[in-house]
């Protein structure tokens, strides 16, 4: 831990934003980063004020991300990486600017609001020597890494079934019409590109892919916009057919009263099943066929591997959302420093796969609910 | 409770059977029935022995259900009703024989192994003055009746979503090939007519219909037979489109390790959501939008109505599967005696609806997973 | 199962009673008993009416239990056993009358309202050839029998700790003052002999003794009567010192809002711990030191023994309070028929031990909370 | 949040320590502190190396806390506060040194290893203008603050019962004998002063006091040392009598297999009860008498107040142990800056009360389990 802290910049995340603050906390928890620059807002006044809030020196509180990329690339003490925490349609331009400047990019998900934007990012990643990390933060949960290891090791046997769901209730009513800022951009087709599908469905899809290693060969989606006047989907029912024969269901909803942030994953194979839910993330059940079910705990008795790595406190001392997010930041630091091969980090491929998922669901649903292959 | 006990006969359910014993316990719990006759086996020796086990007089231990129907119809102390607990393909003939003899029929689910059999039963019901009850026993759970009442009263607002699932693991391996008798007939297309879909999927479908009042206008199914050499589905993924615009997912599986009898129902409307699972059936959560979630308990504080009726012991004293099943029997007795209008009892229409569900799923899946309307 | 049904009589349990109905259902579930006689009330009119409700012939609907004992003992088809379901202070006289008549006795708990009554019963048991069973029904739960077996087999190592509790909330307010009949006698020192201690504390104490095999060498109790005007304890805090060095806590309360029937048992040894709660009785956790915790289910995967015996339906099909109670009745039938040695059945010794517990707690508390030895 | 970060020093917490790292993460989460100085070890070499690990300048990596207090007090950019994270017997001397130097002290719990040490700290606090905060971190959980508010507002009515417990299993075997460094000092009477009682019992006691506002007038304890050769208690059974008539039980154990960090609090009053467990800290149940139980979630629907303050992410995004700890640090920063009155922060009085608790339990148990008043 004697390495220097990496220098971080941020695009977006000014006053009133939500996910920007989450990224900043996540970057601090393991003390591997310090925030030194930002284009927190495109309004100069607001950019300066937000920067001051966060202890950013006035000359590094930019209002133009292109200027920031240029300036930081030119400084001896320039940022090592930038976090992009803008709405989805505003990921591509800054990501490309920093990648072209040779600065590593940590980008919020989904990759973009439209496939064309995503492709441009992918091209820039390919052309750059800089790294690109996508914050599918739920992969940072120790027990999800444990599950991935167990599946890779064959503990579940041959996989047959995946049941993934991500249910929320905050858009049950059309709060975007009554001034909820987070709701406003997330239900705007231009800014978000999709509704529940992009905001949370991609998380569920990414997590199931990460844990199971399965890759769909086709899917079928039935999307709804239940909220009055809503222009994006707020509920998605998806059937999945995976390469190799496994099958899956994925449910993403923002109109299911009583669900706060109900990301849940269940995977079943010929030999065992696992079940995990994000709201109490320190436990996972593991059911070997013909034996009593086990309750696995983060770093708990009888476990090593993923469940114990990237944790900070002993079992029974719950870690949560922020710690899982922090693990992404810590792994990103190690990736940049070359002490981690990034095998567990969501990257541009994860982003493109998520864009395929969104797009395939939209095409399937628009066709009335037909199977869409790759 | 001063009424006489009704006299019950049984077809099927001899030594070695499973569900017959369940029906008998259910019939005894509330002391409304006494078992006095049976065609417990078509083998005369076995029929007599099984009858003796159960205290049935030798002259009423028949080996031929048609003879039984005739004889019992002719006795002054003949049976009031018969329970049919044979494999699915053996429901129609005895049901029709007793209906024609004017004897009430309590029939296990699903209605039949094939649509044609189901239709013959339906015709017989129509032609008979006798009652027909189908033992979709999960509707006997007090909290499911409570949920039905709440939805009918508008407590959930306009319904949008139903998530129903019924997961088991006992067919993860192809135990039908190794002498498991229950598995053998349940995986035989002729005797069962369907696999997970008929055995448990119809329960889930019936329960969601009973509770929500929703009726599908179309469905789409992806059926699998994961078990080696298995001839029926052991996993069903179903999407539902309900009349009025609500949407649903239904998952039925017998190959999900760690699931014993995981029937679970979640329903969401514009105003609230409910969640219930059969394995701990004495609790249900009710989440009114914008308020803390409530834990409703069978007969518990602040509840009346369905949650308190048809219960036998106070809240906190768990009732289970057998009590819910007993409620079907008790309601059937009241229906026969004319003291209950049968509004809560699954009947021939429930049975036909279940057959539609099975058949539509099979057609959808055989077509590669297409939408099938009514 | 070809044996004849045993003939059962009942003392108490007429119209308006609670536990009598529970005993009757329990006796029916496994079809081993039929109720044929009763002294359901000391009021002749009421006795006859209650008998008629239950299908008891008029000449066997007694109003005097002594007459019933005499008459039934003299009949060729007289009852095999009698269930005594009167308030605690009314256990001794009928129990003795039937024991003296050579009729087996199944008695509700606690044994009596006062030590002197208990001793008289014990003397009568000793003098009689008839059997005496005390319905500490919670010992009938399969997983409690499983736990007992596991502890006896050394699966927990040397026992160190027992945490037992039984919490309810129905006496939070002094409902005995407002016409609640169940509350009235249970809070009357003469009829009940103790409050929470006798009504539920003895259940917790009996269960911990049954499962652990531990026997206290001393205890200390702090009893309270929180309810306004209440004459018996409604909350009991008890410390236990067991022979051999283990220690325990026992909490019994009827004034803990939110607790319906919260009987819970946790036992820890040098090698493992177990935890179980009555409100969801089909699961128990087993935590071997240094390994993941297991979820054991009634009759579930990887278990045999107690968890699978005396069950009626497969795992995942919840059994509850009535089934556990039924197991007591079934075991009692087997005991009477000589096909069961009664090792698992609570008997007169359990009853005397419970009386010691009540009395020792009362003496301890009256002394200001001092240790009381045996 | 535009204020400068406060400057933090640390005594203890060098390489190989546990709780020091927790304090450091907690101090970083809300970005209110920066660690700039330390006496991380009394060994100069180790102090320097540990300091380097943490980015502390060499001239501020002291090996003598007295020198550190002196030097930092004299610097213009000297530390605002010091965190003391040494074993219990090493709290007093550094705390006094910094208090005398006018530097605020954040001290780990319990206050000290012996009453005399505690008193010396208390005297120094009284004599100093500096603040003293004791890290009873569990009071930082939002739902515990919510519970405190609800009780203060009378939502539970008059309090009657408290059931507090803190169970772990990591000392089931005598791991202190086999090189476990954390176990070694925590089971050394000189360094720790008490076993489970001091390490975790004081947490449970502090939390119940914080939430309920109750103050014991007497207690009785039965302490055990189950571990072979163990010199301190590893299990504590405590009965509590509170001023005003409420009663409580407290169980602290480090020998209960299957318990990782099972701090649990249940409080019951005349009108309602609450239940909470630390291992899933984002939910708490609230049971108003006669109404369905509510599941309250951190920042969740229908709640404001404590449950929503000092949280960083929306409901459903679990916060955990580190965030609750961070809240103590953030409140301490506000206390020092004068923007918070410290009403929610554990302080010297909490520390002295905890020492009374430990000492009274030890005296009670040594006397064979007698009541000990204040």
Image (cartoon, coloured by chain):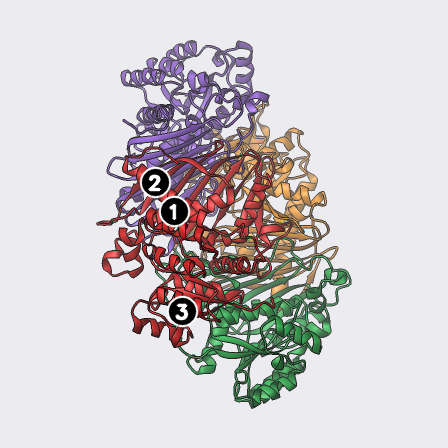
Chain colours: A red, B purple, C orange, D green
Q: How many dots with numbers?
A: 3
Per the model, the C-alpha gap separating discs 2 and 1 is 10 Å
- Badge 3 vs badge 1, beta-carbon distance below 8 Å: no
Q: Chain of mark 3?
A: A
Displayed quadrant of residue D113: bottom right
Per the model, the C-alpha gap separating discs 2 and 3 is 41 Å
Percent position of residue C206, x then y: 62, 49
Q: Which residue is mark 2?
A: A361
Percent position of residue D225, x then y: 72, 63
Q: Which residue is mark 3?
A: A71
Mark 2 / mark 3, whichever is N-terminal? 3
Q: Chain of mark 2?
A: A
Which circle marks residue D187 in the picture? none
In the rendered image, the vertical position of residue B7 relative to residue D110, given as above or below: above
Is residue C324 visible to the viewer in this orientation of the structure?
yes
Mark in the foreground, 2 or 3: 3
Q: Which residue is mark 1?
A: A201
Is residue C346 visible to the viewer in this orientation of the structure?
no
Mark in the foreground, 2 or 1: 2
Percent position of residue C18, x then y: 46, 44
Displayed quadrant of residue B46: top right
- Badge 2 vs badge 1, beta-carbon distance below 8 Å: yes
Q: Secondary structure at mark 1?
A: helix
Mark in the foreground, 3 or 1: 3
Residue at 59% from the left image edge and 64% from the top image edge: D250
In the rendered image, the vertical position of residue A66 relative to residue A197, given as above or below: below
Q: Nearest the camera: A238 or C344?
A: A238
In the rendered image, the vertical position of residue C305 relative to residue B124, given as above or below: below
Percent position of residue B362, x then y: 38, 24
């Amino acid at each position: 831990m004697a390495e220097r802290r990496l220098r971080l910049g941020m695009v977006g995340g000014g006053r009133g934003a939500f996910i920007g603050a989450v990224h900043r906390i996540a970057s601090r928890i393991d003390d591997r980063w310090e925030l030194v620059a930002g284009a927190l807002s495109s309004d100069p006044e607001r950019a300066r004020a937000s920067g001051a809030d966060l202890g950013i020196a006035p000359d590094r509180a930019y209002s133009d991300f292109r200027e920031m990329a240029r300036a930081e690339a030119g400084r001896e003490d320039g940022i090592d990486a930038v976090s992009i925490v803008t709405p989805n349609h505003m990921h591509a331009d800054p990501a490309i600017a920093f990648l072209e400047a040779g600065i590593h990019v940590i980008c919020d998900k989904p990759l973009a609001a439209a496939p064309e934007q995503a492709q441009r990012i992918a091209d820039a990643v390919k052309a750059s020597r800089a790294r690109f990390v996508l914050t599918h933060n739920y992969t940072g949960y120790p027990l999800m890494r444990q599950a991935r290891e167990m599946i890779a090791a064959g503990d579940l046997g041959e996989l047959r079934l995946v049941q993934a769901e991500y249910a929320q209730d905050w858009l049950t009513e059309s709060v975007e019409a009554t001034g909820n800022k987070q709701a406003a951009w997330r239900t705007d087709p231009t800014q978000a590109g999709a509704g529940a599908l992009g905001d949370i469905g991609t998380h569920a899809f990414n997590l199931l892919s990460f844990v199971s290693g399965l890759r769909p060969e086709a899917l079928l989606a039935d999307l709804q916009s239940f909220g009055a006047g809503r222009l994006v989907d707020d509920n998605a029912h998806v059937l999945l057919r995976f390469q190799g024969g496994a099958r899956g269901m994925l449910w993403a909803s923002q109109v299911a009263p009583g669900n706060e942030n109900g990301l849940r994953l269940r995977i079943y194979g010929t030999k065992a099943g696992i079940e995990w839910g994000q709201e109490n993330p320190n436990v996972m059940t593991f059911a070997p066929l013909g034996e009593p079910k086990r309750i696995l705990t983060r770093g708990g008795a009888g476990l090593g591997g993923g469940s114990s790595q990237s944790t900070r406190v002993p079992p029974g001392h719950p870690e949560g959302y922020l710690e899982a997010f922090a693990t992404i930041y810590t792994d990103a630091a190690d990736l940049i420093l070359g002490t981690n091969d990034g095998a567990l980090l969501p990257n541009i491929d994860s982003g493109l796969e998520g864009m395929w998922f969104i797009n395939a669901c939209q095409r399937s649903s628009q066709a009335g609910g037909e199977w869409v292959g790759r």
